[in-house]
Amino acid sequence: MLTQISFFLCVAPLFLPPSGWQAVQPKEFSSHAKIGFVGESTGPYRPSIHLTSEKVDCTLKAYLKAVKEIHLSQPNTVWRDLGCLEMKAGTGQLTESRTPKMSILQAIYLSDGVAYILTAAVSREDFLSKQKEIIAAFKSFDLSQDLWSAIKEEELRVGILSAIEAKEWKKARQLIEKANSSMGEYWQFLALQEAYGKIYPK
């Protein structure tokens, strides 16, 4: 049976959001958005982090130049390149832009003609308290060839794949939600999306 499930393989951009941050539906972002999360704040602006991707036909240096121009086109904005950032997927680039009220950190990684951008927006008042967990989330970014192989419990992994193959949506959903405790909310979002698409193809 398991020899028939190779079609579940996919390239999935993954990261672990800061602990306690809540998922936000992608429809609230741009068409390039994958997922977003928001955290708690004592001020009027809740910190947020979201992942976007877009196809590109340029080098990382050229892409950074375009990013810089976009940020500096906004009034009262300061932008700077903070240098390389080691992520699970490889070496990315960390940038920062600041406005009078907000600090925006971005981790940018290019792979196979696709730019992956993690963007965190934080109020200037919350920046120092949130910076460490945001950078940790950026560093966790990885490109997985298979959502399911990351599940360490073989019985759980086999159960999910078997349920998908048998088109048992309720069972697949329950098992994926069970795996969420160790895999994280973003993984669960992708896994449920992938499973639903296989069980109920358009």
Image (cartoon, grey):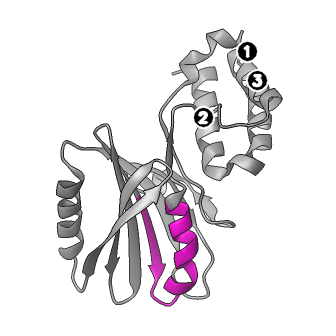
Q: Which residue is mark 1?
A: 166
Residue 158 numbered mark, or none: 3
Amino acid, disc 1: Ala
Q: Nearer the viewer, mark 3 or mark 1?
A: 3
Asked if residue 121 is among those painted magenta in the image, a careful observer would answer: yes
When asked about the image quadrant of residue 79, the answer is: bottom left
Circle 1: is it few (<14), some (14-19), or many (20+) Cα within 10 Å?
few
The residue carrying pointer 3 sits among few (fewer than 14), some (14 to 19) or many (20 or more) residues within 10 Å by Cα, namely some
Mark 1 or mark 2: whose residue is earlier in sequence: 2
Q: Residue at x 61, y 58 (%)?
A: 23
- Frontmost residue, 8 versus 41: 8
Please give the name of the residue rendered at 36% of the width and 52% of the height, measured from the top-left corner.
Answer: 109
Q: Is residue 78 above or below residue 139?
A: below
Q: Amino acid at mark 3?
A: Val
Give the SS element for disc 2.
Answer: loop
Q: Which mark is residue 147?
A: 2
**Is residue 138 shown above or below 170?**
below
Amino acid marked by disc 2: Leu
Query: x%, y% of residue 33?
Result: 42, 51
Q: Earlier in the sequence, mark 3 or mark 1?
A: 3
